[in-house]
């Protein structure tokens, strides 16, 4: 068992902070080297959603090396899938992950998808339809890594997917927070934007919280940031641990409902 996945100390999740050069800890954004997708083989595979960046006035992000949907790739998902593999009996692919668009037919093969920086997302009609169909057929998506005023764009774009959408703020009593770990508090701080308190929203069939949850929205939070740098000492261990616990709960909840 590698150092990242030494688990279950005093009934909790314990991760070893490795000593890394400051240059690694300071590594932030920029376009990572994208690795080729792997074929579907029945194993639980982390799927990251890719989207086209909008062009804002003056050229905006078009042509930029910064691709928000790729933030924390690939270290975030590599670390996280190792944790899920160690903790569960699921067959998890830990050495590779896939990057797909919402209108890619391959997306339907995977039960769970993840989107970073959902505040920048502006789907085409085909992508909006692709996500609508994916959710209707049983898919579950995790929206992560956005904060503040970006909520307005996210909600507007989700209305294209589900025109009657009404995100519902989740309380600690919701079963997703007790699916594997019993989460004791929802008082999370955004890892980068101090002063932003996390809020968790659920997207449900027919806007009915008694029906199937289609998506969870980590607003004012960035779980994958903690996952990516959990082996560097950049963040306190308890913060990284809690981010892993939430992620594990999401996976277990989605796979068992």
Image (spheres, helix red, strand yellow):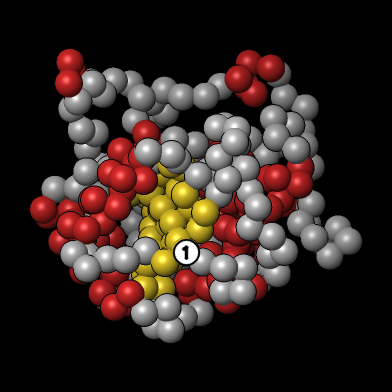
Visible residue check, residue 219: yes
Tally of marks: 1
**Relative to 192, is 172 above or below?**
below
Task: Spot the residue most to the right.
Answer: 10
- Tell whether 169 sits left or right of 122: right
Q: Residue, x 29% and y 69% (percent of image)?
A: 135
Give percent across and percent down for residue 200. 50, 58
Please tell me in which quadrant of the rendered image residue 180 appears.
bottom right
- Tell whether 36 sits left or right of 219: left
Q: Residue, x 76% and y 56% (percent of image)?
A: 13
Q: Residue, x 51% and y 66% (percent of image)?
A: 170
The residue that label 1 is drawn on is 169
**Relative to 39, is 52 above or below?**
above
Give percent across and percent down for residue 127. 18, 53
Judging depth in this view, the residue of 27 and 190 nearest the camera is 190
Please tell me in which quadrant of the rendered image residue 152 appears.
top left
Task: Spot the residue most to the bottom.
Answer: 210
Is label 1 in a helix, a strand or a loop? strand
- Tell whether 179 sits left or right of 220: right
Q: Residue, x 52% and y 54% (percent of image)?
A: 199
Q: Badge 1, how many Cα within 10 Å: few under 14, some, many 20+?
A: few
**Relative to 110, is 63 above or below?**
above
- Tell whether 29 sits left or right of 65: right
Visible residue check, residue 3: no
Give percent across and percent down for residue 89. 62, 72
Give percent across and percent down for residue 241. 71, 50
């Amino acid at each position: 068992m590698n150092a990242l996945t030494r688990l279950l100390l005093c009934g909790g999740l314990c991760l070893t902070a490795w000593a890394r050069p400051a240059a690694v800890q300071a590594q932030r954004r920029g376009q990572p080297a994208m690795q080729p997708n792997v074929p579907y083989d029945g194993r639980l595979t982390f799927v990251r959603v890719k989207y086209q960046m909008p062009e804002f006035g003056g050229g905006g992000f078009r042509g930029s090396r910064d691709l928000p949907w790729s933030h924390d790739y690939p270290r975030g998902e590599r670390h996280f899938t190792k944790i899920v593999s160690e903790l569960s009996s699921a067959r998890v692919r830990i050495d590779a992950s896939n990057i797909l668009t919402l209108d890619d037919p391959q997306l339907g093969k995977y039960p769970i998808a993840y989107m970073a920086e959902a505040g920048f997302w502006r789907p085409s009609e085909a992508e909006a339809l692709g996500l609508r169909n994916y959710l209707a057929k049983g898919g579950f998506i995790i929206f992560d890594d956005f904060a503040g005023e970006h909520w307005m764009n996210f909600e507007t774009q989700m209305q294209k997917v589900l025109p009657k959408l009404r995100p519902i703020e989740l309380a600690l009593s919701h079963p997703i927070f007790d699916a594997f770990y019993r989460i004791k508090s929802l008082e999370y701080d955004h890892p980068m934007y101090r002063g932003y308190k996390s809020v968790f929203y659920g997207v449900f069939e027919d806007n009915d919280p008694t029906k199937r949850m289609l998506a969870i929205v980590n607003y004012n939070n960035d779980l994958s940031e903690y996952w990516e740098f959990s082996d560097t000492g950049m963040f306190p261990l308890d913060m990284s641990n809690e981010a892993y616990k939430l992620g594990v709960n999401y996976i277990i909840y989605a796979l068992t409902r």
